Image (cartoon, helix red, strand yellow):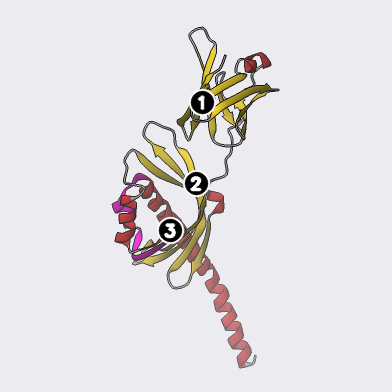
Amino acid sequence: MPLISVRTTLAAFVLVALAPVATAATQDDEVAVRAADAAFWKAYNACDLPAAGKLLSADVEFYHDNTGLTRTRDGLIESLRKGPCANPNMRLRREAIDTSLAFHPLSGGFALLSGQHRFYVQRAGAPDSLDGQASFTTVWIDDGGQWRMHRVLSCAHGPAPYTPPARALTLPAVALARYAGQYRSARIGSIVVVADGDHLQLTAGSFVATLYPESTTRFFAMERDLHFDFEADAAGAIVGLAAYEHGEVSDRAVREP
């Protein structure tokens, strides 16, 4: 066999032999990076800043499309302390969209994790409310055996798509008719509610909402994260309604005669 063929065959053999090793190393790195990422965001959600700091490189850089560049571990931790962790009665909870996550190994002890995530506002005594959605790309560095965030890009911040609750309840026409009428709010003015088949339609100025029942007195809007409670007096007559947005009362209206 010619010498060049021998060398080519040996080189091919070495590459084939090393392929399973490289694949196993990549898989191990992916598991480790994803675990470090989960640990960081768990600390973020709990405002455990010391734990979060351990998963940042000393010279980390964080790029945000609204707030710009934040440099160094100390700088980023301070921004969290003054930002989402400043008020103990209101926190942000980050949640990754699992189906969007993508891992890519990079040579030289680096790795890339990208995807989309959503943020929920947590207020004392109120259910979590969806605040927004963004895209992210994180460059991780193997720093002495510990994977740490090294470069972070967070962009495309905006409202998250609204998904209305499942329609699990149907009220008869006679029940829906109880809520039909004209209401008045000090902030919005006239609000008109009409029964339309198996649902209600609410009109306030140019805003029109399709309402489906969650219970016999509470309805959700199909168009956005709004809920409406119809309020009754002691005799059972409907006398007003309360509008809830992000779990809090945003307006009240009184039924007109």
Circle number at residue 132 = 2
Q: Secondary structure at mark 1?
A: strand
**Which corner quadrant holds the C terminus?**
top right
Residue 205 shown left or right of residue 29 in the figure: right
157 falls in the magenta region: no
**Residue 41 appears in view:** yes
The residue positioned 55% from the left and 73% from the top of the image is 17
Q: Please state the horizontal and vertical placement of residue 30, each as a whole percent of the image.
A: 48, 60
Q: Which mark is nearer the camera, 1 or 3?
A: 1
Q: Please state the horizontal and vertical placement of residue 173, each as a whole percent of the image.
A: 68, 16
In space, the residues marked 1 and 3 are separated at their CA atoms by 55 Å
Indicate which disc, 1 or 3, sits on the residue closer to the N terminus: 3
Q: Which residue is mark 1?
A: 185
User: Looking at numbered disc 1 in the image, what kind of residue is underneath it?
Assistant: Ser
User: Looking at numbered disc 3 in the image, what kind of residue is underneath it?
Assistant: Ala
Residue 174 shown left or right of residue 24 in the figure: right
Crowd tier of the residue under label 1, counting other residues whose Cα lies within 10 Å: few below 14, some 14–19, many 20 or above: some
The residue positioned 35% from the left and 60% from the top of the image is 56
Q: Which mark is nearer the camera, 1 or 2?
A: 1
In space, the residues marked 1 and 2 are separated at their CA atoms by 28 Å
Q: Please state the horizontal and vertical placement of residue 165, each as a whole percent of the image.
A: 58, 33
Q: Which residues are magenta?
A: 46-63
In space, the residues marked 2 and 3 are separated at their CA atoms by 28 Å
Q: Which residue is mark 3?
A: 32
The residue at the far right in this view is 197
Q: Which mark is nearer the camera, 2 or 3?
A: 2
**Residue 28 appears in view:** no
Crowd tier of the residue under label 3, counting other residues whose Cα lies within 10 Å: few below 14, some 14–19, many 20 or above: some
Q: Are marks 1 and 3 in contact (CB under 8 Å)?
A: no
